[in-house]
Amino acid sequence: MSSIESTYVPYKVKDISLAEWGRKEIELAEAEMPGLMSLREEFGAAKPLKGARIAGCLHMTIQTAVLIETLVELGADVTWSSCNIFSTQDHAAAAIAAAGIPVYAWKGMNAEEFDWCIEQTLYFGEDRQPLNMILDDGGDLTNMVF
């Protein structure tokens, strides 16, 4: 896959200045997602997902941001792309990027950008470690891996 960056790109979102708005929305959503918050509280210290390199390809929404941060809190390394070119909430993607979590998503990307974003999630960090878990909504990431 020639479009995978040989140098690490930590994130690509539409507008990183939307991060503060996204953070406020994430905090509101956390209050409405008690299951994920309970997982953080009960298992956060144990880090049961330590060593997991989870590549995600789901709608990049505020609610997904809560899931992403839960996976990180449980010890996983996470990298994310959106499964739909129209569903990304740009403020959610910006907040995740500002939190230091690799995310490649923006609303209205074209087909080439969509594929590029998914390709960026196949490898982790500057040392380009491969994923070892997939969380995929529409099968686009899974199809690219296999």
Image: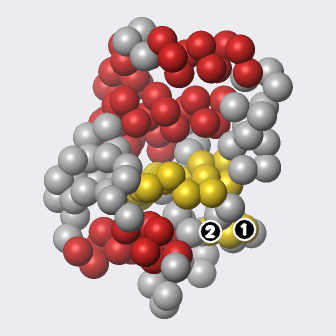
Residue labelled with disc 2: 123
30 relative to 131, above or below? above
Q: Residue at x 58, y 29 (%)?
A: 70
Q: Label 1 crowding class (10 Å Cα cut-off): few <14, some 14-19, many 20+?
A: few
The mark nearer the N terminus, 1 or 2, is 2
Q: Amino acid at mark 2?
A: Tyr
- Residue occupied by mark 1: 129
Tell me the SS state at disc 1: strand
Is residue 123 visible in this depiction of the protein? yes
- Asked whether residue 105 is in view, the answer is no
Q: Amino acid at mark 1?
A: Gln
Residue 115 against residue 107 in the figure, above or below: below
Coloration of the structure image: secondary structure
> In the picture shown, does residue 32 fall above or below 105?
above
Q: Which residue is at the front of the view, 63 or 99?
A: 63
Callout 1–callout 2 Cβ contact below 8 Å? yes
Residue 50 pos. (x, y %) = 78, 42
Q: Secondary structure at mark 2?
A: strand
Q: Position of residue 33 (x, y in %)?
A: 43, 16
Report how far apart the C-alphas of labels 1 and 2 lie in the structure.
5 Å
Label 2 crowd bin: few (<14), some (14–19), many (20+), radius 10 Å: many
Foreground of the two, 67 or 123: 67
Q: Quadrant of residue 144?
A: bottom left
**Apparent side of residue 34 relative to residue 17 in the rendered image (left or right):** right
